Amino acid sequence: MPGLPSIGLPELLIVLVIIIIIFGVGKLPEIGGALGKGIREFRAAQQSPDDEEKKKAEAKEETTEEEKES
């Protein structure tokens, strides 16, 4: 969108300083871990059941092909 400015390095540094002031340095690893876990769970929730079934079917086909070759 042409009206929205991009976020640059100075803006990111300001946000980081504010986060450090609010939470402190000791809490940053906990916050990062919780944020990463939340993102992983969100991505997993976005996958439809069809995607999971396709992955399982592909895995079964691969094991079947390996058994045939042996």
Image (tube, rainbow, N blue to C red):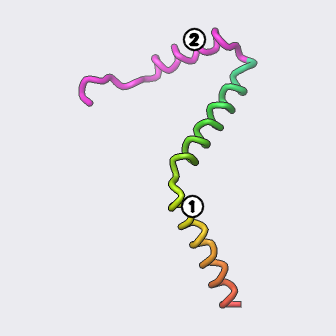
In the rendered structure, which amino acid carries the disc numbered 1? Glu
In the rendered structure, which amino acid carries the disc numbered 2? Ile
Task: Kindly identify the residue that appears in the image at 61 percent across and 36 percent down.
Answer: 38
Is residue 25 or residue 53 the one in the foreground? 53
In the rendered view, tell whether residue 60 sits above or below residue 67: above
Distance from Cα at disc 1 to Cα at disc 2? 41 Å
> Which picture quadrant has residue 55?
bottom right
Task: Kindly identify the residue that appears in the image at 67 percent across and 25 percent down.
Answer: 31
Residue 52's disc number: 1
Is residue 25 or residue 27 the one in the foreground? 27
Is residue 28 or residue 65 the one in the foreground? 65
Q: Where in the figure is residue 65, as x and y percent of width and height?
A: 62, 84
Q: Where in the figure is residue 59, as x and y percent of width and height?
A: 62, 72
Is residue 50 or residue 17 the one in the foreground? 50
In the rendered view, tell whether residue 24 sits above or below residue 2: above
User: In the rendered image, which residue does mark 2 sit on?
Assistant: 18
Residues in magenta, as a range = 1-25
Disc 1 secondary structure class: helix
Please rate how many residues cluster around mark 1, counting C-alpha atoms within 10 Å: few if below 14, some from 14 to 19, many from 20.
Answer: few
Report whether 51 appears left or right of 40: left
Prevailing SS of the magenta stretch = helix
Report whether 58 appears left or right of 63: left
Q: Where in the figure is residue 23, as x and y percent of width and height?
A: 67, 14
Q: Quadrant of the C terminus?
A: bottom right
Task: Kindly identify the residue that appears in the image at 66 percent across and 79 percent down.
Answer: 63
